[in-house]
């Protein structure tokens, strides 16, 4: 039996594992019970029917007057109006995108630790912003927004390296992990046992045994089909501190909507990684799932890594229910700069690692993307696995293209989620007809999430161009201006175009009528997919 067949069989077994089976049965039982109770009551009294209508009306008014994106409103208003008995009830259970107030208040308290830990750096930001404004006003405006509304300061780029493929990130990550002396912090959406994770785990276990503080956060939904239940306990037994984000309990909950989609590694506070790459073998093309897997990351060294460190520690302390002095993890950047950076060119531009969370009404990731598009003068180059965007983003892309900006977007040719890819393709026609150039990555799956604008600005991170990433998930990225990494990012994009297939107006005439109808229906509900 081939390795691929073995992997497929293994995935099927994981899908039907006891944990997954009981979770699905539990959720289905709860939904069946709720529907059964409703139907039972409707047989005996008209009062309950009236109550259901009132509940749906309240849900309708709640949605209409909320601050959520209009497309998200429409996606819920339709089922509420079509199914007045069930619609309002289901919206109350799973429709509200925000975390419960109690949970949000608790995490907000921990976010004050972020503000405290970054206070000194934010004071330095004023000097950096003033210097940046002299060179580039648009860049200083963007950087100030991230500083003021996301709370993460900007730094001169001491050393950043754009990692154009998962294999390269893996090599750099292994090198950095092996050099760890004090601590290793890792936060990932997906982890799966295999060549990549098993090698990393060997290093983590060895480092933990040698006194290095090793901590890991993984998302329970992201790892539902990749890790067994209680895997965190197994890691704890190895000396690796582990915490699971939003553990699944088999109960219908709003928590399922909010996931930790970040991918962060921090080593000793001076070396950090983020980007789209999870810790599973398809990300380094050791196995084939959807053809060749194209993904990217960025490695930072120097003071800017402190932003990533604080992101991790805030999440860690919240999940563990502890409160630490973050400064104990802050390296002496003066010595680091003197030892490793002094001989290098410090006129390398600026980097600004930032986080986005669903705790507030500030969609940082979306605003960063929109600002980049609206400020573009020559080119906007984007890679994204999913293209399910609100009208504001469509308008911005089309307006830029109409104004003569070279707007190009690369999406996957081979999909990982059929319905999501179907919806992605429904956006092609409007964009292409307005001058946006769409390409599909023909060798396989494009999982990279990057922006490069005018060869001057760049973003590498975890933020997809879809509703979940932009509004519901915990995300992160690195915004850059005038760094060597931006040029590397641009070169990689142009090189990738050589193996992409451009979508043209002729392609739309080949679409089947039923495909168009299916796509149109799915697009209405895309914000809640």
Image (spheres, helix red, strand yellow):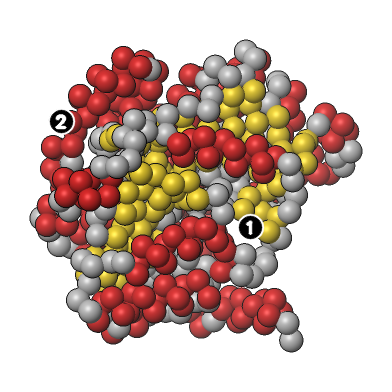
Q: Is residue 243 left or right of residue 406?
A: left
Tag 1–tag 2 contact (CB < 8 Å): no
Quadrant of the rendered image containing residue 522: top right
Residue 144, compared with residue 167, is above or below; it is: above
Q: Is residue 417 left or right of residue 373?
A: right
Find numbered disc 1 in the image and state the secondary structure of the residue it sits on. Answer: strand
Find numbered disc 2 in the image and state the secondary structure of the residue it sits on. Answer: helix
Q: On residue 293, which mark appears?
A: 1
Residue in the foreground of this view, choosing between 440 and 271: 271
Q: What residue is disc 2 on? A: 123
- Crowd tier of the residue under label 2, counting other residues whose Cα lies within 10 Å: few below 14, some 14–19, many 20 or above: few
The mark total stands at 2
At which x and y percent is residue 353?
A: 34, 41
At which x and y percent is residue 470?
A: 46, 40
Residue in the foreground of this view, choosing between 446 and 80: 446
Q: Which part of the image, by quadrant, shows the N terminus?
A: bottom right
Alpha carbon distance from label 1 to label 2:
41 Å
Q: Is residue 469 visible?
A: no
Q: Earlier in the sequence, mark 1 or mark 2?
A: 2
Residue 284, compared with residue 418, is above or below; it is: below
Q: Is residue 161 visible?
A: yes
Q: Residue at x 31, y 66 (%)?
A: 179
Q: Residue at x 52, y 35 (%)?
A: 487
């Amino acid at each position: 039996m081939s390795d691929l067949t073995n992997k497929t069989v293994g995935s099927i077994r994981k899908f039907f594992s006891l944990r997954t089976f009981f979770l699905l049965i539990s959720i289905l039982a709860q939904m069946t019970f709720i529907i059964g109770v409703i139907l039972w009551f409707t047989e005996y009294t008209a009062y309950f029917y009236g109550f259901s209508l009132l509940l749906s009306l309240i849900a309708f008014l709640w949605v209409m007057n909320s601050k959520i994106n209009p497309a998200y409103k429409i996606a819920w208003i339709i089922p509420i109006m079509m199914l007045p008995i069930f619609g309002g009830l289901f919206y109350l259970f799973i429709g509200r995108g925000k975390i419960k107030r109690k949970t949000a208040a608790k995490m907000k308290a921990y976010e004050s630790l972020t503000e405290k830990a970054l206070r000194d750096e934010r004071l330095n930001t004023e000097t950096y912003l003033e210097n940046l404004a002299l060179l580039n006003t648009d860049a200083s405006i963007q950087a100030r927004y991230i500083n003021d509304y996301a709370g993460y300061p900007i730094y001169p780029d001491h050393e950043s390296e754009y990692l154009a493929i998962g294999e390269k990130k893996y090599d750099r990550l292994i090198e950095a992990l092996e050099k760890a002396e004090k601590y290793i912090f890792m936060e990932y959406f997906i982890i799966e046992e295999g060549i990549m994770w098993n090698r990393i785990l060997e290093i983590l276990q060895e480092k933990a045994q040698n006194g290095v503080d090793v901590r890991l956060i993984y998302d329970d939904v992201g790892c539902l089909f990749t890790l067994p239940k209680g895997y965190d306990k197994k890691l704890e037994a190895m000396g690796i501190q582990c915490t699971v984000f939003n553990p699944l309990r088999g109960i219908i909950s709003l928590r399922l909507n909010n996931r930790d989609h970040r991918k962060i590694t921090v080593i000793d506070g001076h070396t950090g990684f983020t980007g789209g790459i999870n810790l599973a073998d398809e990300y380094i093309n050791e196995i084939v799932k959807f053809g060749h897997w194209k993904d990217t990351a960025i490695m930072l060294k120097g003071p800017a890594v402190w932003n990533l460190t604080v992101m991790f520690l805030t999440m860690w302390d919240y999940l563990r229910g502890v409160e630490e002095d973050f400064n104990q993890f802050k390296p002496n950047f003066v010595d680091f700069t003197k030892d490793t950076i002094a001989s290098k060119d410090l006129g390398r531009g600026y980097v600004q690692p930032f986080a986005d969370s669903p705790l507030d009404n500030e969609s940082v990731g979306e605003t960063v993307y929109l600002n980049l598009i609206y400020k573009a003068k020559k080119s906007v180059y984007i890679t994204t696995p999913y293209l399910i965007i609100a009208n504001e983003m469509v308008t911005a892309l089309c307006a830029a293209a109409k104004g003569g900006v070279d707007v190009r977007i690369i999406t996957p040719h081979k999909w990982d989620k059929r319905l999501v890819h179907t919806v992605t393709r429904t956006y092609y026609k409007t964009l292409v007809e307005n001058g946006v150039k769409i390409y599909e990555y023909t060798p396989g799956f494009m999982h990279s999430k990057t922006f490069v604008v005018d060869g001057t600005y760049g973003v590498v991170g975890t933020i997809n161009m879809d509703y979940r990433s932009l509004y519901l998930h915990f995300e992160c990225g690195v915004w850059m201006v005038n760094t060597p990494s931006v040029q590397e990012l641009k070169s990689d994009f142009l090189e990738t175009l050589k193996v992409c297939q451009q979508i043209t107006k002729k392609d739309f005439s080949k679409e089947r009528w039923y495909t168009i109808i299916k796509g149109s229906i799915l697009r209405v509900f895309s914000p809640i997919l």
